[in-house]
Amino acid sequence: MSKLELDYRALREGGWNFDWSKPFDSGETVVKLTLENSQDTQGLIAFRDMPSDRAVVVDLMESAPSNVGSSGKYSGVGGHLFAIAAQESVKKGYGGFVYFTAKGNLIGHYVKELGATPVKGATMQISEQAAQRLIKRYFKNE
């Protein structure tokens, strides 16, 4: 993946909630989700490699403000972002395992939409089987 350029101030002014300069500054992998033939950001995900855990750890994920909630412009942005992390885990030889910490009110959503399972508290995992389902769903043509 190439170095991603983002205008952090424009993100904040555009209604994004998180400070995306932090994952860049800490050297995490940040991936921008766009539509084909467009540079408009639909979502962002930041993750890091954890070889000791044989997993990818997602530290930050956010859909564009226009895609949030049931009235969002595009559905499935969050799922697609987690599929990117799962695909990266497969590439690294971790079988698709992904860990992340969920906001308490989203645990049920992640179980239903991603097939994630709670590990401890708000820590969740995407297993090899769930990762394969996500990858198949969001990367049909690859």
Image: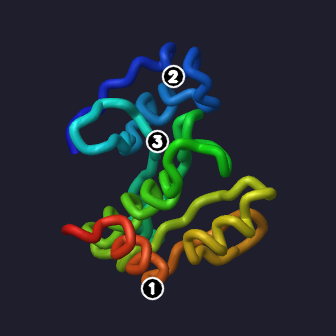
Nearer the observer: mark 1 or 3; the answer is 3
* Amino acid at dot 1: Gln
Q: Are marks 3 and 2 in contact (CB under 8 Å)?
A: no
Q: Report the Cα–Cα distance between label 1 and label 2.
A: 34 Å
Does 133 sit left or right of 38 as displayed?
Answer: right
User: Nearest the camera: 85 or 73?
Assistant: 73
Q: Which residue is mark 2?
A: 11
User: Nearest the camera: 74 or 81?
Assistant: 74
* Amino acid at dot 3: Gly
> Is 137 situated above or below 122?
below
SS label for mark 2: helix
SS label for mark 3: strand
Image mark for residue 129 = 1
Of mark 1 and mark 3, the one earlier in the sequence is 3
In the rendered image, which quarter is residue 139 located in? bottom left
Of mark 1 and mark 2, the one earlier in the sequence is 2
User: Nearest the camera: 51 or 11?
Assistant: 11
Residue 54 in the image, given as x and y percentages of width and height: 41, 72
SS label for mark 1: helix
Q: Quadrant of the N terminus?
A: top left
- Residue plotted at (57% across, 15% down): 13
